[in-house]
C-alpha cells in the first residue's frame, strides 16, 4: 500500500516514517516536507511550502494519510499562526488527498480535543476533528495522546519538566494521564492507516501507554 505522511520531521512523525519504511505491508511512502529527509528506496519526499501546496501533484492519491503536523504557540507566535499549522494545513492535505480518492485519514490529535472548549488549543484540535469528519473519508481515526515522551531536537523547558514528572509519577497515575511514548503513538497511527476500519474512530491516551492501542468506535 501507499502512505502519504505529513509531519515526518517531528517527534511522532519521525517514528511513523521509520515504522512505515520498515513495514513490509507498506510499499511506498510520500512525505511532503519543508526540510529534506534522508533518501530511501520506498520514499518520495517532495519539498513543499504548506501555504502553497501543489494542487496538481499526482502523489496526493494514496491509500491513507497520516498527519502528525503541529506547532507550539511559542514557535507560531500568534493564535492565528498556530491555527494555520494545526488546523488549516492538516485540512488542506485532507482536501487534496480526498479529491484524489484517498479513502483513509489518520490524525495525531490531542487529549481534550473539543470544538466547544474554552481552551484555544483544545478548541483548534476539536475543530480540526470536526472539519475532517465532514470530508467524507471512508475511515477516519483520531489518535489523542496526552503528553508525548521521546527525544526532541528542540528544547521545551515546560514540557521537559512535565515529561520527567509524569515518568516519576507513572505508577500512581491512572493510565489516561501517563506519558505516551512517541513510538507507541506512531504504532497506533500506522495500524489505523494500514488496517482501516470504516467509520470514525478515536484512540484514547490510556491506550497509548505501552501496549494495546486499538481504536474505539464513536
Ligand atoms: N507535545 C505534546 O506533548 C503533545 C501532546 C498531545 C498532542 N500533541 C500534538 O501531536 C502532534 C505531533 O506532535 P510532535 O510533538 O510530534 O510535533 P513536532 O515534533 O513539533 O513536529 C511537528 C511537525 O509539524 C511540522 N511543522 C510545524 N510547523 C510547520 C509549518 N509552519 N509548515 C510546515 N510544517 C510545519 C514540523 O516540520 P519542521 O520540521 O519543518 O518544523 C514537524 O514535521 C501535534 O499536532 C501536537 O499538537 C502534542
Image (cartoon, rainbow, N blue to C red):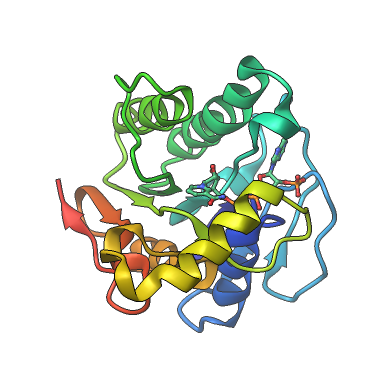
Q: Quadrant of residue 111?
A: top left
The percent coordinates of residue 91 (x first, y second) are 49, 30
Q: Quadrant of residue 38?
A: bottom right
Looking at the image, which residue is at 23% across and 50% down? Answer: 201
Vertical placement of residue 44 versus 58, above or below? below
Of residues 216 and 117, the one drawn nearer to the viewer in this rendering: 117
Looking at the image, which residue is at 70% across and 67% down? Answer: 43
The percent coordinates of residue 93 (x first, y second) are 55, 36
The percent coordinates of residue 98 (x first, y second) are 43, 37
Of residues 78 and 10, the one drawn nearer to the viewer in this rendering: 78
Q: In the rendered image, is residue 53 in sight? A: no
Q: How many circles with numbers are drawn on the protein?
A: 0
Left/right of residue 205 with respect to residue 29 in the rendered view? left
Left/right of residue 204 with respect to residue 193 in the rendered view? left
Left/right of residue 129 with respect to residue 97 in the rendered view? left
Looking at the image, which residue is at 56% across and 32% down? Answer: 86
Q: In the rendered image, is residue 79 in sight? A: yes
Quadrant of the snapshot with the C terminus: top left
Vertical placement of residue 204 versus 34, above or below? below
Looking at the image, which residue is at 41% across and 44% down? Answer: 110
Q: Residue furthest left?
A: 218
Of residues 105 and 7, the one drawn nearer to the viewer in this rendering: 7
The percent coordinates of residue 192 (x first, y second) are 34, 62
Vertical placement of residue 133 versus 217, above or below? above
Amino acid at each position: 500500500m501507499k502512505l502519504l505522511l505529513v509531519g515526518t520531521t517531528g517527534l511522532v512523525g519521525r517514528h511513523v516514517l521509520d515504522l512505515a519504511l520498515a513495514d513490509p505491508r507498506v510499499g511506498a511512502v510520500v512525505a511532503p516536507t519543508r526540510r529534506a529527509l534522508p533518501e530511501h528506496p520506498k520514499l518520495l519526499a517532495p519539498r513543499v511550502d504548506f501555504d502553497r501546496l501543489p494542487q496538481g501533484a499526482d502523489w496526493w492519491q494514496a491509500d491513507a494519510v497520516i498527519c502528525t503536523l503541529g506547532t507550539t504557540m511559542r514557535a507560531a507566535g500568534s493564535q492565528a499562526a498556530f491555527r494555520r499549522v494545526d488546523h488549516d494545513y492538516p485540512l488542506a492535505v485532507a482536501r487534496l488527498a480526498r479529491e484524489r480518492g484517498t479513502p483513509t485519514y489518520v490524525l495525531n490529535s490531542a487529549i481534550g480535543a473539543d470544538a466547544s472548549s474554552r481552551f484555544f488549543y483544545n478548541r483548534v484540535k476539536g475543530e480540526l476533528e470536526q472539519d475532517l469528519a465532514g470530508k467524507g473519508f471512508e475511515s477516519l481515526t483520531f489518535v489523542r495522546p496526552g503528553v508525548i515522551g521521546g527525544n526532541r531536537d528542540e528544547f521545551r523547558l515546560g514540557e521537559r519538566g512535565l515529561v520527567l514528572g509524569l515518568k516519576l509519577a507513572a505508577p500512581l497515575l491512572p493510565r489516561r494521564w501517563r506519558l505516551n511514548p512517541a513510538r507507541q503513538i506512531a504504532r497506533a497511527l500506522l495500524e489505523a492507516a494500514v488496517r482501516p476500519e470504516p467509520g470514525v474512530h478515536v484512540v484514547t491516551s490510556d491506550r497509548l501507554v505501552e501496549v494495546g492501542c486499538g481504536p474505539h468506535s464513536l
